[in-house]
Amino acid sequence: MSSVSNTAQPREKLWNSNYLKVWCANFMIFFSFMLLTPLLPLYLSETFGADKEMIGIVLSGYTLTALIIRPFSGFLVDSLPRRLVLLVSYGLFCAFFLGYLAAGSLILFAIVRTLHGAPFGASTVSNSTVAIDVLHPTRRAEGIGYYGLSNNIATAIGPTVALMIYGAWQSYDVLFWMAFAVSATGLAINYTLDLKKREPVKEKCAISLDRFILLKGWSQGLCMICYAFSYGVLATYIAIYGKDELGITGGTGMFFLLLSVGLILSRLVGNRTLSKGKIVENASIGVAIAVCGYLMFASMHNHFGYYCSALIIGLGNGHMFPAFQTMFLNLASNAQRGTANSTLLVSWDIGVGLGILAGGSVAEHLGYHAAFWTAFAVNLAGVAFFTLYSRQNFLRNRLR
């Protein structure tokens, strides 16, 4: 009897106070981000008269700077006190929302939007790395999945709240102030973090590329670029497409809501299998479901295809993303957690940026349907590469 009771050890706590704080702070990052993202193409079109191609160029600048800063932020997070890096980057992310209020021309807006991507990239890397630090190793895979729910819930309600605010006030400035207030709340939450002191990584040799990019995760990164490309096309042009082609004037919020419902449901289910070590299985199921959603969106030009594909894409990405994040972490040493996170997010940024640019160009010259078929084709290529090479590459090189 005593031996049985001794082996039944209680599970380590998942939702500790620090984890709850970084979870909420991450929600604030993405909620403030999603308050603006769905309406910015309309804002640029209505306020500055920008065409589809120009909208793609202006909005891609944000992703470009996030892409550039993330490898360096991963290095800094691994080399300096993480709380300091987090608070500085989060504070700058918050402050840049005020820049949108001061931008009175398209070029000034483009500059502010482009520069804003840098603190966004740094704060998401540092916040997610701190989240991993405060999780017990036995709950880490599960915690990564739940951490992603903060993004998903923000994505679900952010566009809906934005449309409600804009519908009531008919003012983009109100949205900019709202985004600033939400991000300031997240900064205040992170300020209360109580983190254990850790020894920064001390270089014993010349700084190598592997301190900025997780080279062993190159094939997973290439897959992520393909999946993010497709998402970048849809997320950026969904509002204008729905309005111009389908006559959906207030349906963007519902699209993102259904997308996020799928993300949340699949994460809740997928976390159970992730905690059992079924990483590759989760990733395989996720990418297969998501590509079906992109096919539906590209081929069905009606309300059913518009909304149903959002749910399917959400179900697929909800399985895929935490599995890929766990892959990157399992390919890295403990001293490279920041690098692993930044590599994942850099890959996503590259894909989204390419999707915004290519999607805008294709939509301008060949129409929205061609842009969405392009998104499906690139996603399918990513699924094929993962199936034929990337998953075996991970199994060969994983450290844990």
Image (spheres, grey):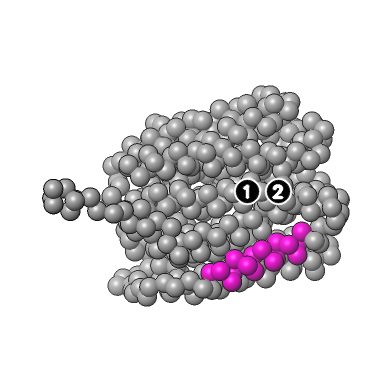
State the mark number for residue 247. none
Alpha carbon of mark 2 to alpha carbon of mark 1: how far? 7 Å
Q: Residues within 10 Å of mark 2 (few under 14, many from 20)?
A: many
The quadrant where residue 324 appears: top left
Tell me the residue at 16%/48% (across/down). Answer: 4
Q: Residues within 10 Å of mark 1 (few under 14, many from 20)?
A: many
Q: State the residue position of label 2.
A: 159
Q: Could you tell me if the residues under marks 2 and 1 are in contact, i.e. CB atoms within 8 Å?
A: yes
Question: Could one spot residue 190 in this view of the protein?
Answer: yes
State the mark number for residue 155. 1
Magenta-tinted stretch: 175-190
Q: In this view, does 299 lie above or below 270?
A: above
Is residue 384 rendered to the left or right of residue 118?
A: left
Residue 259 picture location, percent across and down = 61, 39
Tell me the residue at 53%/69% (across/down). Answer: 190
The quadrant where residue 251 appears: top right
Residue 155 picture location, percent across and down = 63, 48
The quadrant where residue 134 appears: bottom left
Magenta residues, dominant SS class: helix
Residue 244 picture location, percent across and down = 82, 35
Is residue 314 rendered to the left or right of residue 330?
A: right
Q: In this view, does 370 lie above or below 337?
A: above
Mark 1: amino acid = Thr
Is residue 314 rendered to the left or right of residue 238?
A: left
Tell me the residue at 56%/62% (across/down). Answer: 25
Mark 2: amino acid = Pro
Tell me the residue at 73%/28% (across/down). Answer: 303
Is residue 180 rendered to the left or right of residue 206?
A: right
* Element assignment for label 1: helix
Q: As rendered, which of 146 and 372 lies closer to the eye?
A: 146
User: Of all residues shown, which one is farthest toward the top?
Assistant: 300
Residue 383 picture location, percent across and down = 48, 33
